[in-house]
Image: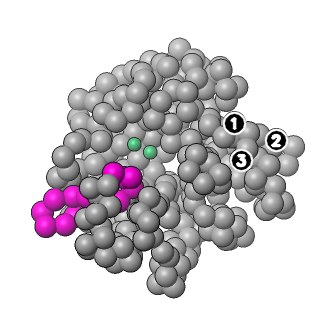
Amino acid sequence: MSQVNSHQQLAVERDCHVHTRLCHHAEGEMAEYVQAALQKGLKGLVFLEHFETGINYFEPTWLNDDDFALYFEQGLRLREEYRGRLEIGLGVEVGYNPGRINEIREFLSRYSWDLIGLSYHYYEHEGRHINMLSHKGQNMAEFSVIGVEKVIGDYLRGLLEGLRQLPVNVVCHLDAALRHHKEVNFKEEHIELIQLILSEIAARGLALEINTSGFVHRGEPYPKKWIIRQALKMGIRTTVGSDAHRPAEVGRYFERLNPWLLQFNNKRDAVTGV
Ligand SMILES: [Zn+2]
Ligand SMILES: [Zn+2]
């Protein structure tokens, strides 16, 4: 799948990051997301469902083997049904887990993916995992004890390692670790790590995700503006995703993203779908 927006074609027409009820923490069937995308006037929709392995967390927030089988069965059927009206991609948001690289690679090799996004949700601590992207108070309290700066550093080092070791196309949630934590603060070390990640993305010709769920929380997309500016300056391609967890969120804030991106004027044409 490939789509490069030109100067004439300003609208973002593809939502490259949506979930469904199959991940156990989102709502709605795949078909409902397809309908929502058509209603929004989108030309493309990429499901980017959660894969995690070796995670010891109190609730599953990802698909199991049977869920993925169903995901492909339904997804391939929908792709045929809507051919010519909506380009449907079947992708995966793969959660980095430092001890499970071979297992993750083996899983990825089982299917033919349209897009593989890298994320890193779960931090291992004393044999259990804590969700770094959650806003739940229980997760936040544990991170305060471990140390917020340490966790953010470990998160970014993990993303970099995942990027180096896994066959991914796009990095999701680049600066998302502990974003709901009141003590969050990016230090020099963290900024350097983000720059290393961007360099790795650029060197490998991969993409960075612009996530419009940021408009809900802070009136701007994720990641932070300076990161997007730097990525565009480095010639890094981007994908745009709503991270919808219910059908009504498909393509959310895309109409605000276009004017927001104009501040990067001549780099605007680097914003693409994959
Ligand atoms: Zn999710
Ligand atoms: Zn997601």
Residue hosting label 3: 257
Measuring 62% from the left and 35% from the top, which residue is drawn there?
251
Name the residue nearer the viewer: 136 or 124: 136
Measuring 28% from the left and 63% from the top, which residue is drawn there?
141
Q: CB atoms at circles 1 and 3 under 8 Å apart? A: no
Q: Quadrant of ligand 2?
A: top left
Q: CA distance from mark 1 to mark 2?
A: 9 Å
Q: Position of residue 70 (x, y in %)?
A: 31, 24
Residue 191 visible in image: yes
Q: Quadrant of the N terminus?
A: top right
Q: Is 229 positioned to the left or the right of 187 in the image?
A: right
The circle drawn on residue 13 is 1
Q: Position of residue 120 (x, y in %)?
A: 37, 58
Task: State whether label 2 is within 8 Å of ligand 2.
Answer: no
User: SS at mark 3?
Assistant: helix
The disc labelled 1 sits on which kind of residue?
A: Glu
Q: Residues within 10 Å of mark 3 (few under 14, many from 20)?
A: some
Q: Residues within 10 Å of mark 1 (few under 14, many from 20)?
A: many
Q: Check residue 267 for magenta coloring.
A: no
**Magenta-colored span:** 124-136
Displayed quadrant of residue 256: top right
Q: Position of residue 109 (x, y in %)?
A: 32, 46
The disc labelled 2 sits on which kind of residue?
A: Gln
Residue found at the very far top of the displayed protein: 81
The circle drawn on residue 9 is 2
Q: CB atoms at circles 2 and 3 under 8 Å apart? A: no
Measuring 56% from the left and 51% from the top, which residue is drawn there?
217
Residue found at the very far right of the displayed protein: 8
Name the residue nearer the viewer: 47 or 264: 264
Vertical relation: 274 (above or below) 20:
below
Displayed quadrant of residue 125: bottom left
